[in-house]
Image (spheres, grey):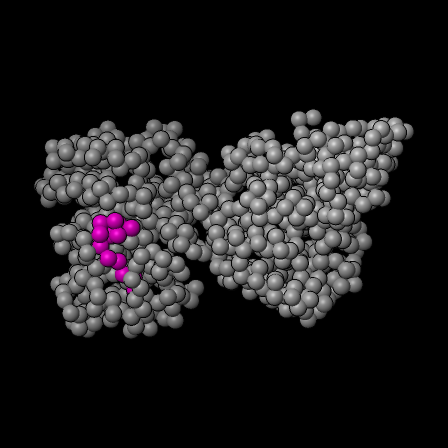
Amino acid sequence: MSAAAIGKDLLGLAHLSAEQITLILDTAVPFKEISERAIKKVPTLRGMTIVNLFFEASTRTRISFEFAEKRLSADTVNVAVSGSSVSKGETLVDTARNLEAMKIDMVVIRHPSSGAARFLADRIQSNVINAGDGTHEHPTQGLLDLLTLRERFGSLTGLRVCLCGDVLHSRVARSNLWGLQKLGAEVGVCGPRSLLPNAIDELGVRVFSRIEEAIEWAQALNILRLQLERMQAGYIPSLREYNRVFGVTRERLDRAPRDIVIMHPGPMNRGVEIDSDVADGPHSVILEQVTNGVAVRMAVLYLLAGGRPELAEAAKG
Amino acid sequence: MADTSATSLVLLRGGRVLDPSTGLDEVGDVLLRDGKVEHAGAPLGEVRRDGDLTEVDCRGLVVSPGFIDVHCHLREPGREDVETIATGARAAAAGGFTAVCAMPNTAPVTDNQAAVGFIIRQAQLARAARVYPIGAISVGQRGEALAEFGEMIGAGAVAVSDDGKPVASAQLMRTALEYARAFNIPVADHCEEPTLAHGGAMNEGIVSARLGLKGIPDEAEEIMVIRDILLSRRTGGHVHLCHMSTKGSVELIRWGKERGIRVTAEVCPHHISLTEDAVEGYNTNAKMNPPLRTAADVAALQEAVKDGTIDLVATDHAPHHYDEKEREFSDAPNGIVGLETALAVLVTHLVAPGIISYATLVDRMSCSPARVFGLQGGTLRKGSVGDVTVFDPAASWTVDPASFQTKGRNSPYSGMTLTGRAKCTVVGGQIVYRQNA
């Protein structure tokens, strides 16, 4: 498969094939080693300009992208826009045109509106990477989750993975769902019905309304952040009740029929969707996810910049 | 509106004269004298030229009572950059409409007799399709106090509506229906339960789940549909349900009509021709309220047009400036332009597949709107107003919004090839539009 096979942009996993996803994961593997070096830098993207355009606060994803860009020697500019572009008086399309006029090569965009990354990609020549758009997708998070699971289990075929929590508002959930299904995993979701999309049953997933049942079924749980800022809308009665009914606790995991891999895209609400002794416990791969995040993003940047996957090892420099 | 004072003769010769209000369907002529229908039906032979005679060759065309759109947004006053009454009236004429009803959600809101009078004056200057104002139900469309129905009707309004916003208060809706009875006008409601629809950008279903857009469930519409039907039953008032979009609404309307309740309903061309799939790719020209629904809803609505459960077709013509639609989906405004594509959408999606006949099409676009809203027109009966639409049922054309008369370009049909096109529109015996004229 040629590098161009993943396309001009990375907007989501819904439209990628299993082969394309596997290509990105395979490319990430050699890049992972760079972060282990004393001098964590290779010249692969030297001379390229990348803009990290964040319309939402996001320390974790922005830093991960920035590390990936710098380790590949790209020039980076961080643009943090408070509030939406609309409230600032400039439309997203104007922002896009201005960036294009400054002759950049790539944009990493985080935006509160679903479809914003697609909107930008349709209007500029530069490569666009979706770093989270509204409640749509967060493809690099999905990819790093897939890489982490693949490292743990070898293959995702037939693997049972349950997404737990606020699926309704989660862009991570959608990217995970598409990615896992394409690579042959079985996907479950678990949470109160008020936090699951109404049509979730039509997406080929198993739906659990009890966390105990999900734990009994799954080999891995990807525990989604309960979006506290949305709780005033009354999707659940209280955080306390949520923890008691749906929280992943040490006690519940101890009753599981097998060891379960515990994942969380962060930031975590400890004591709400996940207890601290689970987050910090032996089953947790949460910090491996963070490490893999940099490697996956390096791979995506490399491939979109025209890198040839068979030369990824050589690109380590 | 056209000037009807001059002595004039318009002879529409050799077309298929189709008037469901009189059961007429034959190849023949229509003669309009001094703005009134003098003859409709059999060929006239030689016509005595005792005035200025304009003759239009209608061979191969359908000649019908003029189409009437009871639901459009002309944006004036307030957003003349998007549409004016003049451009809207010209767009209407180009679409074959001889009359349109303008919704009151302008800035300021049409909630008093002076505002109604302004619209009528602007329409007279436009000299295109007739424009009938619809007054607001509540002052400022704030859903609190009733607007002055009596004075607005006296000044020329033909109905009341808070369209663009639902009447959230059941008590206010009840009062409006009771009060409107004195004037025998419909109370047109935008059926949307606001707490269920809040923040929604498209239909709630598998597509919204996939795209990560907040959905608007069917029940947001249907709860208000049944509420309004029950309030009509309680009050005896005439409730007209705007832009129906769900199968469930059709069933509820059928239930109401079977019980003799004074409920009428409309559907828009887009809701009987497009599904939620049109939103894929975050296409803001497919963003509207109520949203595009599913194939099952489309089928139910088509059937309801056929059997009369849905009384009429209205466009909900809603122009927006192109850069207002050129933004993130959730931030883009709702609505599409529809006056110049309505006929073709109905011919393509209802008549051509054999779901309805041309007679039913003309009834739902002309006779029925006139009947339901108590407007002149909707018939070619002798002595009635000379409002006539001539259309080519076989004309195939590719939609190019750049060629529209409306200022709006926001059409989901852009680039599609449709069949059926207005060729000539006559208002009060005056030709106000001829294609390629």
Q: Locate residue B327 relative to residue A209 in the image: left or right.
A: right
Residue drawn 62% across the image and 55% down it: B307
Give the camera-side residue of A245 and B89: B89
Can residue B180 be seen at all in this image of the molecule?
yes
* Residue B283 % position (x, y): 46, 42
In the image, residue B273 sits, relative to residue A195, either above or below, namely above
Residue B353 percent across, percent down from the top left? 55, 44
Q: Is residue B144 above or below residue A300?
A: below
| Residue A179, magenta (yes or no) | yes
| Residue B343 shown in magenta | no
Image-based side of A224 in relation to B407, left or right: left
Q: Residue at x 70, y 46 (%)?
A: B366
Residue A257 as seen in the image, left or right of residue B114? left
Instruction: Report x, y in % for residue B134.
Output: 71, 51
Q: Decide if residue A278 is on the left or right side of residue B412.
A: left
Q: In terms of image quadrants, where is residue B242?
A: bottom right
In the picture, which quadrant includes the C terminus of chain B?
top right
